[in-house]
C-alpha cells in the first residue's frame, strides 16, 4: 500500500488529502518531551463479514486494556526515575490496531501524519502543513513520534514496518516473532524483545521428538506469523526425520464451515496422526476447539500450540474439555507484580487517560453507563449500582513483561542517545529536536539493560532477543476446574520436561506414528508415494547386518552379524576337535588298532620261524603291518588342529600307509599268480625270476617309493599350510591347503594298486584248498574297493572331508588287519598244534572259486582229472621236476627249502592209486614211484630228495 501526503493548491487554499475512515478511532495520549507511539490490539479483529468496513470486535482485556495501562504505568515509572532520562519526560500516543493489518496501517498513517515535519512548498519557502493550511511554524500541540511500540501480530508488524521504515521510525515489538522480521535488508528499523520463531519452531520440534511423535499433522494461521513459523518447523522436522501427515492453513476469523472442513481432513489421518502441531494465533486454536465440539471428536487429537496460544484463558474458555492435554510454548516472562498493584486499583471515575476504559468496564462487569458516549445498550443493569472490583477473575497478560521491556528498551535507547548527543545538557538539546530515527536505531541496537523480571535484555545484529520458553500443559486440575500447568522449559536449545506432571487427553500416552519401529535386524522399506515415516519392515538376510535404517549390508567372507545385528564379528574357526563325539570314536578306534597291530607284530616276530609265519611271506607281512600302523596314526594328524606340521604329516601318512599295505599285497598276489601260471605248464624250462623273499621286498619298496616320490613332488609344488575354508557363508573351517590334485594323485595311485591287487586275487581263485591265504586277500580287496568307492563321492560331495578320510583309512587298514592276520593269529595262539609242518600237507581236493568240483565217475573223466592234477603236481614254487631240470644236489636242496618255506603251496597228492598200484604220469622220470604213494602226512620235499639221490646213483 502506497500512501501520499501532500498539501495541494485548489482555489488559492491549501487542503489535506485524507483517506476516509469508516469510524472514528479513539486515541490515548500522554504528553511529554519525547512522544512514543504504540499499537495495541484493544479490540478483537474484524470478523470475516466486517473486514471491508474495518469494524473491530469486542474489547480485549489482556491484549488490549492491560497493555494500554502497562504503557501508562511504565512511563510513570520511567519519568519518576532520576537515573533514566533525567529532566526529560516521555509521553505516548496509543492507537488501536484491532490485530488487523488494514486497521494498523490506518493508525500508522496517523502517526506519520502527525509527526511529519518537512512538507514544504519550494516556490514560497519552507512552511508547515497544519490541518491543510501552510504555516512557517511546526504544530504547537503535537510532537513527532520518536518510535513505535508494537503491534503484537507478526503479519501486522510487517505491514507497519514497511510504512515506518520509509520515515526512519524505529519499531520495537513485544510479541511479533516472525522469522521474516529478522531480515535487516527488508526490515531495517525493526527490533523485538522476544526471540525469533526459528527458536520457537525448534522448541516445538523438540517436544514432538521427546515423545517420539514422528507422524503429525500441521496447521497454521494464514498469515506471516503462521506461515513463516510453520515453514521453519517443517524444514527442521524434515532434517530430523519427522513427517507431516497433513498440512493446512486457515484464517483466524474464518467461518465455522472452514474449520469443520479442516478438522475432517485431519480426521482422515487418524488413527496414525493424532498429534496436531498448530503454529497458530490464539483465535485459530479456539476455532479448532469449537469445531471439535461440533463434530464430537474431543480427545481424538492432541494439540501442540505455539506462543500464539501460550496460556491465554480466552482461547480455551468454554471449550476446556477439548483443550485438555494440549501442550503450548510460552515466552518465558515472570508476572509483573507492580503492574498488578497498579491495575487492580484503577477505577472508572479516576482513570481518565484511557479512552477505552469505560467500554472495558461495561464489558468486564456486564453493565452499562447511561448517558456515556460509549454506553453499551446490550447490558441491562446500571454500572453505578455495582460494587465492582477488577480483582475478580483477574489474570495478568502473559506477555506483560515483554510489553514493559519494549517500552524500557526505547527509553534506554533515548537515554544513551541523549548522553552521547547532549552531554551535560539538562533536558533535550537541539540535536534531539526532533529525534533522528536513524541515530536512535544505532543506540537501540547497542542497548543492554536488566528487564522488569530481572533478565538481561539485549539485541543481536538482527534486532532479536535471546530465546527462553516455558512449556505449558492445559490440565483438568479437579472436576470442572482447568488450568495451565508449567511442566518444563526450553532455554538455549535445551528442553527440560517433567513427564510426571504431564497430563494427556487420554488415559494412556498418545501415539502418533505412521509405522511402528522395526525389530532388530530389520530395515525400513519406504513404499512408493509415501512419506519417509511410513514404511514396511523387512528383515535382512542371515549374513547381513543393519548398516542404517534403510540398508542391509552383507558381512565379508568369514564374518557374521553380531547379536545386535549392527555389525560383523569373526566367525569362530571350526576344525575337528578332540572333544567331538566322532573324534573320540575315531581316537579310541585308532588306539585299539595300534595296540592290536603292535600285538600282531610282536607275535609275528616272536613266532617268525614257525610254519604259519614262514608260509605267509613274513617280510611282506612286516611291511603290511607297518602300513597298518601308519594308517592308525593318520587320524591323529587329521583330527589335530591344522598346523604346518600336521598338514605335512597328513599329506604324507594318508597316501603312504595305504601304499605300504597295497604294494605288499600286490607283490604277494602277483607272486601267487605267477606260481599258479607256472603250475599250468607241463614242463618249465626257465626258473621264474624275483621269487625270493628279498626280491619281493624290493618290488614292494619300489612301489612304495613311487607313492612317496609323488607325495614329495606335490608337497614341493604346493607346500602344506593351514588355510580357511568356506563351505558356506556361515561356516569357516581351518583345514590344510590340499588341492584336488593333491588328493586325486595319491588316491589314484593307491587305487591302481588296489585294482591290481584285486585283479590278482581274482586270478588266483583256483589255488589249492589249503592255500587259503588267497581267499583272505581276495576278501580284503573286495571290501577295500567298496570302502574307497564309497569314500570318493562322500569326500568330494560333503564338507566332512577330514572325518571321512580318517574313517576310510582306519576301516581299510582294519579290514587288512582282520582278514590277513586273524586266521594266522588264531592258529598261533589258539591252535598251536596246527602250527607244525604236518598240518600243512596237501589235501585231496582242490578249492575252486569257480566250478562245482565234482568227483570223476567214468574212466575217461578220471584219466582227464589225473592229467590236470599231474600238471599241478609240479607246482613247487614254479618248478616242473624232470631229469633235465635237476642238475645237482645243491639245486635240489634249494628246491627243498623253498618248498618248506611255502607249505601252503603244497599241491594235493592225486598220483596215488589207493587200491595199490601207483600210476606214474612220468614213465621216464628218475623220480621214484614211491612219491606217488607218499602218505598224506609226508612232505614232498624229503621224498623228492630221496628219489633224486636214487636216480643219481642209477645214472
Image (cartoon, rainbow, N blue to C red):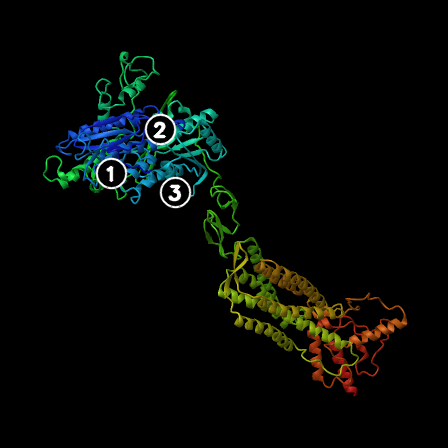
Q: Are marks 3 and 2 in contact (CB under 8 Å)?
A: no
| Mark 2: secondary structure | loop
Give the residue at x 85% y 67%.
855
Q: CA distance from mark 1 to mark 2?
A: 26 Å
- The foreground one among 96 and 111 is 111
Q: Can you name the residue that lies furthest to the top here?
A: 385
Q: Earlier in the sequence, mark 1 or mark 2?
A: 2
Q: Can you name the residue that lies furthest to the bottom here?
A: 955
Give the residue at x 78% y 78%.
681
Q: Earlier in the sequence, mark 3 or mark 1?
A: 1
Left or right: where 628 falls relative to 458: right
Q: Which residue is mark 1?
A: 170
Mark whose residue sits in front, 1 or 2: 2
Using the image, determine if residue 644 lies above or below residue 338: below
Residue 765 placement (x, y as % from top left) = 75, 68
Give the residue at x 69% y 84%.
890
Check disc 2: other Cα within 10 Å, few if <14, some if 14-19, many if 20+.
many
Residue 821 placement (x, y as % from top left) = 65, 65
Q: Which residue is mark 3?
A: 236
Q: Are marks 1 and 2 in contact (CB under 8 Å)?
A: no
**In terms of image quadrants, where is residue 233?**
top left
Residue 417 placement (x, y as % from top left) = 17, 40
Q: Which residue is mark 2?
A: 54
Q: CA distance from mark 3 to mark 1?
A: 32 Å
Check disc 3: other Cα within 10 Å, few if <14, some if 14-19, many if 20+.
some
Residue 494 placement (x, y as % from top left) = 32, 39
Amino acid at each position: 500500500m502506497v500512501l501520499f501526503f501532500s498539501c495541494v493548491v485548489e482555489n488559492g487554499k491549501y487542503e489535506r488529502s485524507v483517506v476516509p475512515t469508516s469510524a472514528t478511532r479513539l486515541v490515548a495520549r500522554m504528553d511529554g518531551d519525547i512522544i512514543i507511539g504504540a499499537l495495541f490490539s484493544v479490540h478483537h479483529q474484524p470478523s470475516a463479514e466486517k473486514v471491508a468496513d474495518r469494524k473491530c470486535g469486542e474489547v480485549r482485556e489482556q491484549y488490549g486494556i492491560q497493555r494500554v495501562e502497562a504503557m501508562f504505568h511504565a512511563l510513570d515509572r520511567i519519568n519518576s526515575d532520576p537515573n533514566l532520562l533525567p529532566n526529560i519526560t516521555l509521553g505516548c500516543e496509543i492507537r488501536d490496531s484491532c490485530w488487523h493489518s488494514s486497521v494498523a496501517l490506518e493508525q500508522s498513517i496517523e502517526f506519520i501524519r502527525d509527526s511529519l515535519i518537512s512538507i514544504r512548498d519550494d516556490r514560497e519557502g519552507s512552511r508547515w502543513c497544519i490541518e491543510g493550511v501552510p504555516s512557517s511554524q511546526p504544530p504547537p500541540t503535537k510532537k513527532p513520534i520518536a518510535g513505535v511500540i508494537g503491534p503484537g501480530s507478526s503479519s501486522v508488524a510487517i505491514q507497519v514496518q514497511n510504512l515506518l521504515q520509509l520515515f526512519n521510525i524505529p519499531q520495537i515489538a513485544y510479541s511479533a516473532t516472525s522469522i521474516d522480521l529478522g531480515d535487516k535488508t527488508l526490515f531495517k528499523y525493526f527490533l523485538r524483545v522476544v526471540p525469533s520463531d526459528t527458536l520457537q519452531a525448534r522448541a516445538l520440534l523438540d517436544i514432538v521428538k521427546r515423545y517420539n511423535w514422528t507422524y503429525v499433522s500441521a496447521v497454521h494461521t494464514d498469515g506471516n506469523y503462521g506461515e513463516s513459523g510453520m515453514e521453519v518447523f517443517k524444514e527442521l522436522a524434515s532434517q530430523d526425520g519427522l513427517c507431516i501427515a497433513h498440512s493446512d492453513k486457515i484464517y483466524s476469523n474464518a467461518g465455522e464451515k472452514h474449520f469443520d472442513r479442516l478438522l475432517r481432513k485431519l480426521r482422515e489421518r487418524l488413527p496414525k496422526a493424532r498429534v496436531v502441531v498448530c503454529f497458530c494465533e490464539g483465535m485459530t486454536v479456539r476455532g479448532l476447539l469449537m469445531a471439535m465440539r461440533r463434530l464430537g471428536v474431543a480427545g481424538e487429537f492432541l494439540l501442540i500450540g505455539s506462543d500464539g496460544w501460550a496460556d491465554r484463558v480466552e482461547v480455551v474458555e468454554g471449550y476446556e474439555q477439548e483443550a485438555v492435554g494440549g501442550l503450548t510454548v510460552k515466552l518465558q516472562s515472570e508476572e509483573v507484580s507492580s503492574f498488578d498493584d497498579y491495575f487492580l486499583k484503577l477505577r472508572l471515575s479516576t482513570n481518565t487517560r484511557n479512552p477505552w476504559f469505560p467500554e472495558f468496564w461495561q464489558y468486564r462487569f456486564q453493565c452499562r453507563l447511561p448517558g456515556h458516549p460509549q454506553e453499551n445498550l446490550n447490558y441491562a443493569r446500571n454500572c453505578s449500582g455495582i460494587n465492582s472490583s477488577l480483582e475478580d477473575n483477574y489474570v495478568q497478560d502473559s506477555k506483560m513483561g515483554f510489553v514493559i521491556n519494549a517500552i524500557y528498551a526505547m527509553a534506554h535507547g533515548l537515554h544513551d542517545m541523549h548522553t552521547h548527543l547532549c552531554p551535560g545538557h539538562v533536558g533535550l538539546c537541539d540535536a534531539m529536536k526532533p529525534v533522528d530515527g536513524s541515530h536512535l536505531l544505532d543506540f537501540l541496537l547497542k542497548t543492554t539493560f536488566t528487564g522488569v523480571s530481572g533478565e538481561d535484555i539485549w539485541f543481536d545484529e538482527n534486532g532479536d532477543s535471546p530465546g527462553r520458553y516455558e512449556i505449558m500443559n492445559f490440565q483438568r486440575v479437579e472436576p470442572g476446574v482447568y488450568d495451565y500447568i508449567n511442566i518444563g522449559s526450553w532455554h538455549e536449545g535445551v528442553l527440560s520436561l517433567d513427564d510426571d506432571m504431564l497430563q494427556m487427553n487420554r488415559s494412556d500416552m498418545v501415539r502418533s506414528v505412521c509405522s511402528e519401529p522395526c525389530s532388530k535386524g530389520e530395515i525400513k522399506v519406504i513404499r512408493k508415494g509415501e512419506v519417509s515415516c511410513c514404511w514396511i519392515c523387512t528383515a535382512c538376510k542371515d549374513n547381513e547386518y543393519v548398516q542404517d535404517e534403510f540398508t542391509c549390508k552383507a558381512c565379508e567372507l568369514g564374518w557374521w552379524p553380531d547379536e545386535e545385528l549392527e555389525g560383523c564379528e569373526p566367525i569362530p574357526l571350526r576344525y575337528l576337535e578332540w572333544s567331538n563325539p566322532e573324534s573320540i570314536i575315531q581316537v579310541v578306534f585308532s588306539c585299539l588298532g595300534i595296540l592290536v597291530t603292535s600285538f600282531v607284530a610282536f607275535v609275528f616276530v616272536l613266532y617268525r620261524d614257525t610254519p604259519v609265519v614262514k608260509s605267509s611271506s613274513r617280510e611282506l607281512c612286516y611291511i603290511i603291518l607297518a602300513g597298518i600302523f601308519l594308517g592308525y596314526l593318520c587320524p591323529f594328524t587329521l583330527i589335530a588342529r591344522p598346523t604346518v606340521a600336521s598338514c605335512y604329516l597328513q599329506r604324507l601318512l594318508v597316501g603312504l600307509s595305504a601304499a605300504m599295505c597295497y604294494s605288499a599285497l600286490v607283490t604277494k598276489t602277483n607272486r601267487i599268480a605267477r606260481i599258479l601260471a607256472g603250475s599250468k605248464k607241463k614242463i618249465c624250462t626257465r626258473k621264474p625270476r624275483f621269487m625270493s623273499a628279498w626280491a619281493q621286498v624290493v618290488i614292494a619298496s619300489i612301489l612304495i617309493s613311487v607313492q612317496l616320490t609323488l607325495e614329495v613332488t606335490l608337497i614341493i609344488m604346493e607346500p602344506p599350510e593351514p588355510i580357511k575354508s568356506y563351505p558356506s557363508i556361515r561356516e569357516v573351517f581351518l583345514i590344510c591347503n590340499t588341492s584336488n590334485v593333491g588328493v586325486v594323485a595319491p588316491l589314484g595311485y593307491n587305487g591302481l594298486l588296489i585294482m591290481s591287487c584285486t585283479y590278482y586275487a581274482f586270478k588266483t581263485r583256483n589255488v589249492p584248498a589249503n592255500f587259503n591265504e588267497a581267499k583272505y586277500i581276495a576278501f580284503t580287496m573286495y571290501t577295500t574297493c567298496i570302502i574307497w568307492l564309497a569314500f570318493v563321492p562322500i569326500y568330494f560331495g560333503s564338507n566332512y572331508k577330514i572325518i571321512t578320510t580318517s574313517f576310510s583309512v582306519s576301516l581299510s587298514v582294519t579290514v587288512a588287519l582282520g582278514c590277513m592276520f586273524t586266521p594266522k593269529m588264531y592258529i598261533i595262539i589258539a591252535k598251536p598244534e596246527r602250527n607244525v609242518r604236518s598240518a600243512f600237507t596237501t589235501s585231496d581236493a582242490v578249492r575252486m572259486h569257480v566250478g562245482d568240483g565234482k568227483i570223476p565217475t567214468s574212466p575217461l573223466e578220471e584219466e582227464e582229472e589225473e592229467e590236470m592234477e599231474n600238471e599241478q603236481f609240479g607246482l613247487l614254487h614254479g618248478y616242473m621236476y624232470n631229469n633235465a631240470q635237476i642238475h645237482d644236489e645243491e639245486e635240489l636242496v634249494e628246491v627243498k627249502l623253498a618248498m618248506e618255506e611255502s607249505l601252503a603251496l603244497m599241491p594235493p597228492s592225486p598220483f596215488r592209486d589207493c587200491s595199490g598200484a601207483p600210476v606214474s604220469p612220468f614213465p621216464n622220470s628218475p623220480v621214484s614211484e614211491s612219491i606217488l604213494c607218499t602218505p598224506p602226512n609226508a612232505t614232498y620235499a624229503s621224498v623228492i630228495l630221496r628219489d633224486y639221490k636214487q636216480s643219481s646213483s642209477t645214472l
